């Protein structure tokens, strides 16, 4: 056998040996892996609660035309316990005589939009700045004892040549009973009566009693919260995300 053939055979032998070593290594690795317990990959991403997955529609109004597009539609109160409303006597309200405060999840059927100059100070401009004039939505309350009575609530103002509206922050454009259907009929029965019960969450209690709150702690669901409840405070202790104690403040 000549020298060249010997070199070629040596190269082939080395290649075959390398392949054999690789195959043996892979076989050994597979055998080890098959005998090792399965390793489950851990997903460290925070799990979102069902409430966090609810899509809340926004309309971003910036003109009277945008607000008038609500006429004939039903909207629902989101900012419960924050907005005073008034009797509408022909596109005019008496700011000194509020009827009551709008409560959470209450439906309003929008009948009109008008402007009025408000007082410069006081409760009437605590939520909606006075500006040069207020913009008010006129509405009826289908769920009230007098569904034909016309009321109005300020939702924005005009100042320095432009309008600013808080409609997106004050209302739901879709029925919250459907948006938060996962709460279940028992919880919604309490919310619609504006009352709370053990086992309810902070969000559910806030929908029932209003958004004017004084939280005692930073961890939601693991603290106590005092709800103003339209001047009738209620303090609720939460543990594990649920109400465990309800106290009416004297």
Image: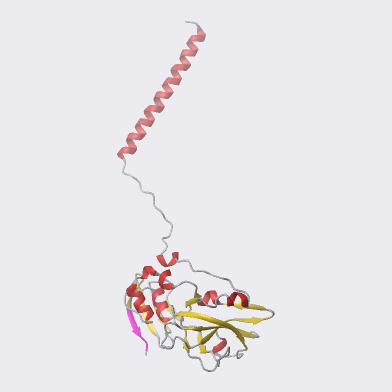
Q: Where is residue 128 in the image (x, y as percent from the top left)?
A: 57, 83
Q: Residue at x 35, y 32 (%)?
A: 28
Q: Residue at x 55, y 88 (%)?
A: 124
Residue situated in front as seen by the camera: 79 or 241: 79
> Chief secondary structure of the magenta span?
strand
Can residue 129 be seen by looking at this rendering? no
Q: What stretch is highlighted in magenta?
A: 245-249
The quadrant in which residue 48 appears is bottom left
Residue situated in front as seen by the camera: 101 or 94: 94
Above or below, 24 relative to 86: above
Above or below, 180 relative to 6: below
Above or below, 233 relative to 239: below
Q: Where is residue 233 in the image (x, y as percent from the top left)?
A: 40, 86
Residue situated in front as seen by the camera: 228 or 145: 145
The quadrant in which residue 160 appears is bottom right
Q: Where is residue 241 in the image (x, y as percent from the top left)?
A: 36, 70
Q: Quadrant of the C terminus?
A: bottom left
Q: Residue furthest right?
A: 161
The quadrant in which residue 69 appears is bottom right
Q: Where is residue 37 in the image (x, y as percent from the top left)?
A: 31, 43
Number of marks present in the image shown: 0
Q: Which residue is drawn at 50% across and 6% down?
A: 2
Residue 59 magenta-highlighted: no
Q: In this view, does 171 lie to the left or right of 227?
A: right
Q: How does the figure colour the protein chain or chains?
A: secondary structure
Can residue 164 be seen by looking at this rendering? yes
């Amino acid at each position: 056998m000549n020298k060249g053939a010997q070199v070629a055979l040596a190269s082939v032998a080395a290649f075959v040996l390398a392949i054999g070593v690789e195959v043996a290594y892979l076989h050994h690795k597979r055998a080890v892996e098959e005998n090792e317990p399965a390793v489950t990959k851990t997903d460290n991403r925070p799990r979102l609660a069902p409430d966090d997955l609810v899509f809340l529609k926004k309309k971003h109004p910036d003109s009277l035309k945008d607000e008038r597009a609500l006429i004939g539609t039903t909207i629902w109160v989101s900012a419960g316990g924050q907005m005073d409303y008034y009797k509408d006597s022909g596109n005019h309200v008496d700011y000194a005589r509020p009827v009551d405060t709008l409560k959470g999840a209450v439906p309003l059927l929008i009948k009109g939009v008008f402007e009025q100059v408000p007082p410069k100070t006081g409760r009437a401009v605590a939520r909606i700045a006075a500006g040069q004039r207020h913009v008010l939505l006129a509405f009826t309350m289908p769920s009230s004892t007098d569904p034909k009575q016309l009321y109005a609530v300020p939702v924005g103002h005009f100042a320095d040549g432009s309008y600013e509206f808080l409609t997106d922050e004050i209302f739901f454009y879709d029925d919250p009973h459907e948006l938060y259907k996962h709460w279940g009929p028992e919880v919604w029965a309490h919310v619609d009566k504006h009352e709370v019960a053990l086992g309810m969450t902070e969000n559910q209690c806030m929908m029932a009693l209003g958004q004017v709150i004084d939280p005692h702690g930073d961890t939601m669901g693991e603290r106590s919260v005092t709800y103003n409840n339209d001047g009738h405070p209620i303090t609720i202790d939460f543990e594990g995300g649920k109400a465990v104690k309800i106290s009416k403040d004297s």
